[in-house]
């Protein structure tokens, strides 16, 4: 089940006067990018990820809206709750897409009848259009969903598999991007029927393991299961101090470092979070938590400010603290929308640049300045500079030559997160 132009549909629900008009979410600025557009706008050749300037040239009369991620996240939760109440097993693939396992439902209701009734209930209760495709596996169901849009439903049974897939263009297969499509087109492969006739060995030689996966999808083969959706899926980290503290500047710096590390992991895993939780433990072992639901995001600045506000709420007794922790939950797969939600495009570029450095040189190769501690000083108060030759001799003398490559890889930045007496733990639920 997939929402039709989800962001636009939510805006139309708020303002019915937009119905039937070319509406574009995002792309309003000189460097903006289209995040979503109505089907009326798509008739002019506009699509997601297109530069806003190009969209304006193609459709000057289009209505550009900035977008409201908080409203879209709320609508996504409403849809998920309705699906969870009525189906035995489902997977939330993204903010507007769900896979539902209907195995065995035909014995009681009939799968098509049940799915159609669910779709009608969602549209009636939430006033949002949704389409679905019903088939033998996730790949064919997704293709059928895309073919039924907008506002449609389609069933592809096993006997109908080949007549349905063969005439379609290869770009209809999930996982075929621009580069792959160009390479296959140059070979004369433009429809799925032609792709199925290529030997598997040749597909592996051309595209490697990805080529074999595409060949299987073209033949209607997909063994990936529907992964049960758990709303409490989360990632978190916490630090226990050797000496209890109530240094607010230090505590906030540690929280900043924690959030930065977690968002780095989120972006690497192509996930977004919709809930943030801050935990503190006082010197008397009393533990207090505070959480807040937020729009789907993986951006540092927004989550850091939220974490600081939650910390100020939860730290009410002004006692010494022995532990502080941060958890991001309600995770879904997806990417941050560029050029939307009052966040400058420079921040997205900064996050991407920092992530590239961290992936190459380690998680602490570049960090927020506020979490960096003062450098070590000698007896005269002068900064002790890093000396690689001295470190090399130290490694040789202590018999750690085998670990030398690993030691050299470690970041030279010393932060509160690595301070003696502070232990960090990361956990997944």
Image: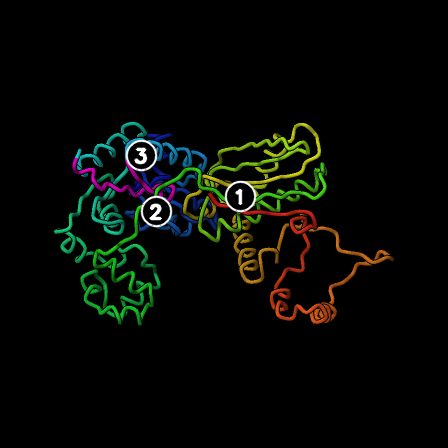
**Mark earlier in primary sequence (1, 2):** 2
Q: As drawn, is 337 to the left or to the right of 326?
A: left
Q: Is residue 392 visible?
A: yes
Secondary structure found at label 2: loop
x and y percentages locating residue 361 in the rendered image: 58, 62
Q: Dot 3, crowdedness within 10 Å: few (<14), some or many (≥20)?
A: many
Marks 1,2: beta carbons within 8 A: no
Sequence-first tag of 3 and 2 = 2
Q: In the visual, does 384 lie left or right of 79?
A: right
Q: Which mark is residue 59?
A: 2
For disc 2, the neighbor class at 10 Å (few under 14, some 14 to 19, many from 20) is some
The quadrant where residue 93 appears: top left
Q: Quadrant of residue 105?
A: top left
Q: Which residues are magenta?
A: 88-107
Disc 1 target residue: 236
In this rendering, the count of numbered labels is 3
Q: Is residue 40 visible?
A: no
The magenta stretch spans residue 32: no
**Residue under label 3:** 83
Q: Earlier in the sequence, mark 1 or mark 3?
A: 3
Q: Position of residue 12 (x, y in %)?
A: 34, 33
The image's colour scheme reads: rainbow
């Amino acid at each position: 089940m997939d929402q039709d132009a989800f962001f636009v549909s939510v805006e139309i629900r708020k303002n019915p006067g937009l119905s039937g008009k070319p509406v574009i979410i995002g792309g309003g600025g000189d460097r903006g990018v289209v995040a979503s557009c109505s089907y009326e706008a798509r008739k002019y050749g506009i699509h997601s990820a297109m530069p806003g300037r190009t969209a304006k040239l193609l459709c000057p009369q289009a209505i550009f809206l900035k977008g409201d991620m908080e409203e879209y996240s709320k609508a996504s939760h409403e849809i998920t709750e309705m699906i969870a109440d009525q189906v035995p097993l489902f997977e939330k693939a993204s903010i507007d897409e769900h896979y539902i396992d209907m195995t065995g439902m035909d014995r009681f209701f009939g799968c098509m009848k049940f799915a159609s009734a669910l779709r009608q209930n969602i549209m009636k209760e939430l006033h949002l259009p949704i389409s679905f495709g019903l088939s033998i596996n996730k790949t064919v169901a997704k293709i059928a969903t895309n073919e039924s849009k907008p506002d449609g439903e389609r069933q592809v049974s096993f006997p109908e598999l080949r007549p349905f897939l063969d005439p379609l263009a290869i770009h209809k297969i999930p996982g075929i991007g621009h580069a792959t499509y160009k390479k296959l087109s140059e070979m004369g492969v433009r429809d799925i029927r032609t792709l199925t006739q290529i030997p598997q060995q040749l597909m592996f030689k051309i595209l490697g393991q990805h080529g074999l996966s595409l060949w299987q999808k073209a033949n209607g083969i997909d063994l990936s299961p529907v992964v049960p959706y758990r709303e409490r899926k989360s990632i978190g980290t916490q630090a226990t101090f050797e000496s209890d503290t109530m240094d607010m500047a230090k505590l906030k710096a540690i929280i900043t470092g924690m959030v930065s590390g977690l968002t780095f992991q989120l972006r690497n895993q192509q996930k977004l979070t919709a809930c943030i939780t801050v935990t503190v433990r006082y010197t008397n072992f009393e533990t207090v938590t505070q959480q807040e639901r937020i729009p789907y995001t993986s951006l540092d600045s927004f989550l850091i400010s939220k974490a600081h506000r939650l910390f100020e709420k939860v730290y009410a007794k002004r006692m010494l603290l022995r532990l502080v922790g941060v958890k991001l939950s309600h995770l879904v797969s997806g990417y941050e929308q560029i050029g939307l939600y009052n966040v400058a495009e420079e921040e997205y570029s900064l996050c991407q640049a920092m992530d590239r450095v961290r992936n190459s040189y380690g998680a602490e190769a570049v960090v927020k300045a506020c979490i960096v501690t003062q450098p070590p000083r000698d007896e005269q108060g002068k900064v002790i500079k890093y000396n690689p030759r001295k470190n090399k001799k130290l490694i040789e003398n202590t018999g750690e030559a085998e670990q030398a490559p690993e030691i050299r890889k470690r970041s030279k930045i010393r932060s509160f997160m690595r301070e003696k007496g502070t232990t960090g733990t990361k956990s997944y639920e």
